[in-house]
Structures are given as C-alpha cells and as structure tokens.
Image (tube, rainbow, N blue to C red):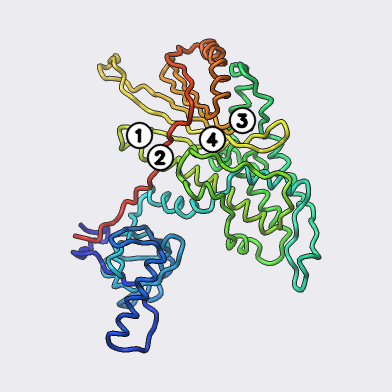
Amino acid sequence: MKLSSDQQLPTSPAPVTSKPAQTNDAGQSGRETTALSARQQLDQLQLANRESVMARVSEIINRQGNAEILLDVRGKPLQVSTAIGATELAPGDWVKVMRAGNDLQLLGKLASTPEAAMTRALAQRMPWQQSLDSGLAKLMTALNQGVIPELSPGQLPAARSPQPLPEAAKQALETLLGRLPASNTLTPGSGSQSNTVQQIRQWIAESGLFAESRLAQTPSAALPDLKLAIGRMITGLLAEQSGDAVSAFNRLTPLATPELVKAPLQFPQSVALSPPATGSEPTSVGQTLRMLAGMLNRITVNQLHSQILSARGGGEAAAATSTMLLDLPWVTPQNEPRMAQLRLEQHKNESSSKGDSGKRTAISEWRLNLSVDLEQAGVVNFEVSLRQQEVSARVWAEKQDTLKQVNQELPLLRRSLTELGLDVTDLECRRGSPSYPTTKLEHRLVDTRA
C-alpha cells in the first residue's frame, strides 16, 4: 500500500516509544527505571496491552532523524520519540496507536477526506458540550441578577458585585428567550392548525442546526437563530473586556454537562439529563463565557454528527440517506427552560412496482424520534414512521400513570392523523424507553504496513 506521495510504506508498524524520565543510573538499574517510567505513563492512560486508541499530534518537537512528538491521548499529554520514516506527521493529525508492552506502535494516521475532517472537528468538541436547557437556565439568572465582573489587579473577590449584562448581550438574550415556544401554546389536537405548524417550523429552523446555511441565504446580523444568538452574546460580553479578549476567549475551557461527556454521540440521550437549576447564584463573566462556549460546542456537535451520519448513508444499505439531529429548547408555563431531542431520518427503499421506464422507483420513508422529559409525566419518547401516505407511531412512557394517560389519548391521535389524509397502519403505547443507536466514529486510516 502506498501513500498519496507514492512513497513505499514500511513493512511493519513504526515503533513509538514513550519518552522515559531522565536518570543517571547505569546498567540494569537504569533499564528498570526506564521501563517503569514508560509503563507508568501508559498505565495512567488506562491503556491495556495490545489495546489501540486514537491520539492527536499536538506538537512536533524535532524533525531531524528521531522526532520528539507530543501526543494528546485521552485528553492527557504524552511525549514520545519515533522515527517517522515514510509516514509524515504534522500538528493536528490524528493517529492510531497500540500499546505493545511498554512501547506504542503507530498503526496509521487518519486519511485526509471530508469525513475525516468532520471526524476530527467532532472529536475535538465532543468532550466539551453544555446542555442547552441548563445553559439557558443560567443565562436567565444572568439576565435577572447580572454577572460578576472579572477580578482587577489587587482587587479582593469579596469586593465584586454583580453587574447588569452588557446591552448587546442583553438584547440578544431577550430576543432569544422571547422566541422560545412555551408548552402551554401547544394543545392536543392542534397539530393541523396553520399557526401550530408555522410555530413548529420556526422552532426547528431557528434551532441552530441550519445557522450557517440560513446566514448565507439571508446575511443579517440580527437573524433569529439559537447558534447566532449565542455568538452575539459572546461578542457583547467580550466587547466589555480589556486586552485581546478574542484570544483570551479561545483559551477558555468550555463547561461540559457530565451526561453528555459519558455518551457524547448517543442521540437522543437514553438517560434523562439533570434538570437545569433555577434560581442559582450569579456567575462570573469568565464562567458565563465558558458556558456559552460549551453551548456552541453542543450545537456544532449536532451539526457535525448529522453530516457524518448523512455522509455514511450512501454506503450502507440499512443506513439513513439523510439524518438531522436537533436539540429543541422550550419553556414551561413557569418560564423554566426544558429541551426536546429530535432525530429525523430519511430512508430510501425500492418500490414493489415498476414505473413507466421499467425501473423500480425509490420511495422515501421518514422516521422521526422525539424524546422529551416532562416534569410530571416523566420521559416520553415518540417513534413515527411515514411512508407515502402510510404512518405508524409508537409512544414510550416510563411512568405507569403516563402510560395510562397516553393510551386514553391514542384515539385523538389517530383521528388527528386521519384528518391529515394519512392511513394509520399501527398505533401503540409501551412502557419503558426505546434503545437509541450510539454512533461509532470510523477512523479511516492510512495503513503503515505494506
């Protein structure tokens, strides 16, 4: 196998040896110290023997002969030495390494493809996602109570008091909150009403998933969109900071929601997220910026995740040809932010009959999964399948009382679907929750073996 540069690859994996701690001892004692140092570093990474893992090249320290490379392995830095040979590495590359005793073996590096670029961007943001409902709850606190300014040189923490949000950030937040749908505006049986349909369309369009596309079509600094509104809030907060605020923001570590760290690519989440805390104490400007950065990451992860799943659709028979993953925030009658998770897939199947040309035509089947955690009803999941005019639906409820209530409402749901001109083939309610798929990133590697 050859690289794009037409250089012949080595016939065995390139060894990458962990750089040991320096020692002045000689002989067997020195060798034991070296081995122990390498083993300790690998053990700290919780990397078992013969286990492989993806790592990011953070820095190339020496390019002459044996290179010193700084890897980011599972969020921890590891300095290694290796003879690069025909496998060229650069900062930002993703490589696959395997532990072999107290050494690492380089198995390959991520190929330069559009999906690989999206995978790298996704991997960088996955550990730093902030749940949107939790973030919005804290932003409501900032709107009502202000934010604590950063410490000035020589200033004591107790001397700081909350200050109102900058006007630009305040306006962006007020506009965003004013456009969030409220649960009491969507009543059972109103799905066919034009105002309800328009509200749902607006809800999805302004979710942030289509931010860049909408901005390209309608360039406007005030375009209503969740992702763009978060960007405007960040800009408003940074405008009040001294020095190079943009560089300082890029160095911030985004705040992450623990549940999203545990299962970053499971959508919808199988475990309900912790309810957002309301009435909390004001946070500092820095903490607010970190939280906003985490919210941006969450939306961007959904965008990249959707693109990767859609890109795979053409090559796998059972895979959806198009996938959209959306977090849809809403507010309760008490003005508390909550969130629904929507997964929309398009599957194309061949028709059983042939068209005028003698070829079988493709029929689209749309599958919708909606997960929402209601305060009294608990977690409710909806699975809907639409194929031409045929529709089937299944509702999952975790609480027995909710299951009973949904069963009582099934006739109303059937009647509403029929009034839309649909043929209801199946309609049922089950206790529990469905199993949602977890995406596995496929690292397409440049093999380092012939």
Q: Secondary structure at mark 4?
A: strand
Front residue (pair 20, 447): 20
Q: As displayed, is residue 251 above or below residue 200?
A: below
- Estimate how packed mark 2 is, as few (under 14), some (14 to 19) or many (20 or more) residues with alpha carbons within 10 Å: many
Q: Secondary structure at mark 3?
A: helix
Which numbered disc flags the more N-terminal residue, 4 or 2? Answer: 2
> Mark 4 or mark 1: which is in front?
4
Q: Where residue 213 appears, x then y in whole percent? A: 53, 40
Q: Mark 1 — residue?
A: 319
- Estimate how packed mark 3 is, as few (under 14), some (14 to 19) or many (20 or more) residues with alpha carbons within 10 Å: some
> Mark 4 or mark 3: which is in front?
4
Q: What residue appears at the point 55 percent right and 19 percent down from the top-left corner? A: 404
Q: Secondary structure at mark 2?
A: helix
Q: Mark 2 — residue?
A: 309
Quarter of the image with the C terminus in it? bottom left
Q: Where residue 127 appears, x then y in whole percent? A: 50, 53
Q: Are marks 1 and 2 in contact (CB under 8 Å)?
A: yes
Label 4, label 3: how far apart the Cα atoms are: 16 Å
Which numbered disc flags the more N-terminal residue, 1 or 2? Answer: 2
- Estimate how packed mark 4 is, as few (under 14), some (14 to 19) or many (20 or more) residues with alpha carbons within 10 Å: some
> Mark 3 or mark 2: which is in front?
2
Label 3, label 1: how far apart the Cα atoms are: 28 Å
Mark 2 residue type: Leu
Front residue (pair 84, 103): 103
Q: What residue appears at the point 38 percent right and 47 percent down from the top-left corner? A: 441
Mark 4 residue type: Gln
Q: Are marks 3 and 1 in contact (CB under 8 Å)?
A: no
Residue 341: image tag: 4
Which numbered disc flags the more N-terminal residue, 3 or 2? Answer: 3
Residue 202: image tag: 3
